[in-house]
Amino acid sequence: MTLPYARDFMLGRMFAADAAFDGLFYTGVTSTGIYCLPSCRARKPRAEHVQFHATPHEARAAGLRACRRCHPDGYRGVPGPEAAMLAALGGVRVPDVPGVRALADALNLGESALHVHWRELFQVTPGEWLARERVRLAARTLRGTGDSVAEVAFAVGFGSLSAFGAQFRRVMHLTPQAWRHAGRGGGLTLTLPAAFPLEVVWRDLGRDPDSVTQRVEAHAGRVAFAWALPGGPQRVTLHVTAGRVEVHPDDPEALTPADWEALHALTVRALGLHTPLTPGDWPVPLVPQAFDGLIWAVAGQQVTFVQACRTRRTLTLRYGTPVAGGLTAPPTAARLAALEDADLRACGLTDARAALLRRLAGRVARRELSMDALARGTVGAARRTLLAVPGIGPWTADYVRLRVLGFPDIVPEGDAALAASLRCTHALPARPTPAQVQALLHPHAPRRSQAVLRAWHAGLNPT
């Protein structure tokens, strides 16, 4: 069967371990005799030892056997329309597409159909997706090369410097020049959107008043976090004044360029700046460190929010890393993967949840599961990947997509706190069923994640 992708493109997706292309092609390794999913986190082979196959059957016919790490035969597959769209998108280079109309033409679609597909696949408009992808390319180039800002802008497909600057500031919350020089002077400053509802963020960040990973002082306009950076954990304080956020690590001299890039990403996540906001929107703060988000998800399975907080605090105090100010950075995946299930049960987890958390920790530590890759892919691929992990059900998958991956139109329909809040808000005689929850929140599409956050904040037990 002929594959719809160029060999170089498939090699690139394989080396990037891109889960979005799982099931769309399979990687055969002639030197070891195995075949894998593109997202497999086993050591990548040399390009000359790689062949590509359309199906597992085709790979087996070529004399290959299934990888025992990524289990390609057990992959549930991609729905036909999604597979077809990703196949077509695989031949598109973002810098070569000047706008939405050109993207539609490249995919042989009308603009209306393109908008529908993009909402279903990525939960953003095609224009938002193009801007995000261009800015991501530009950000990497600005930090990794000496090319001028103008050279970078035109290389990634922007038609003018003014358009580049505006979109870069909208996505990154600082100028291209400030991003290139991030960390000089020992700090980092981000600009907040107009009419940013800071009180929402303070309330959300302070939802566990006894948190050991962060301390909110809303009256003083600051919050301190314990964050694990590439170079090691530090206490980081965010000062919010006059529409901007100043990021101050305790020991800026010890930070590497990678640490400053991580600080920027963590700040954007913590304040809910990952999705462009317009006046009236609510930011949806994400769990800053993705693996900590998985800890929240497992600790929160079928328990109250108070119980989840208690379990997470215990885990963090026992296996996290203390920093200044009495704060503790969340435990890393590698740290928890090295434990026994009994160690996790002693922190308040059931047998099943202890096994799940250690399973997730192992996959993340071995780079078999990448939250970054899931966030960049389709909303459906993220759900399929999460549900394929034994112990993860629909609620956990939805929570992770909303609070960790940052998809903007997620409804965790089985969430008890959400249902209780909606019952109160709508004066319902009984707690709404999952189908009724979906119906009540449908008018808020395509920004239902915001509506969920509003409901959680309105309830007695925020999530």
Image (tube, rainbow, N blue to C red):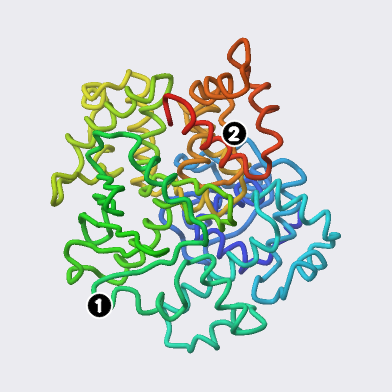
Relative to 275, is 255 above or below? Answer: below
| Left or right relative to 382: residue 459 | left
Question: Dot 2: what SS?
Answer: loop
Residue 411, labelled with which disc?
2
Relative to 85, is 392 above or below? Answer: above
Residue 252, labelled with which disc?
none
Q: Which badge, 1 or 2, comes first in the chain's sequence?
A: 1
Q: Please, what is the three-letter code of the amino acid marked with disc 1?
A: Gly
Residue shown at the point (57%, 40%) measured from the top left: 449
Instruction: State the image coordinates of residue 202 (x, y, percent, origin top left).
Output: 37, 45
In terms of image quadrants, where is residue 381?
A: top right
Question: Dot 1: what SS?
Answer: loop
Q: Please, what is the three-letter code of the amino acid marked with disc 2?
A: Val
Residue shown at the point (61%, 69%) measured from the top left: 8
| Left or right relative to 452: residue 109 | right
Locate the C terminus and report the quarter of the image it occupies.
top left
Q: Are marks 1 and 2 in contact (CB under 8 Å)?
A: no
Instruction: State the image coordinates of residue 317 (x, y, percent, origin top left).
Output: 18, 36
Relative to 286, is 459 above or below? Answer: above
In terms of image quadrants, where is residue 210?
A: top left
Front one among 451 and 182: 451
10 Å crowding of disc 1: few (<14), some (14-19), many (20+): few
Front one among 178 and 369: 178
Instruction: State the image coordinates of residue 229 (x, y, percent, origin top left).
Output: 27, 58
**Disc 1 target residue:** 185
10 Å crowding of disc 2: few (<14), some (14-19), many (20+): many
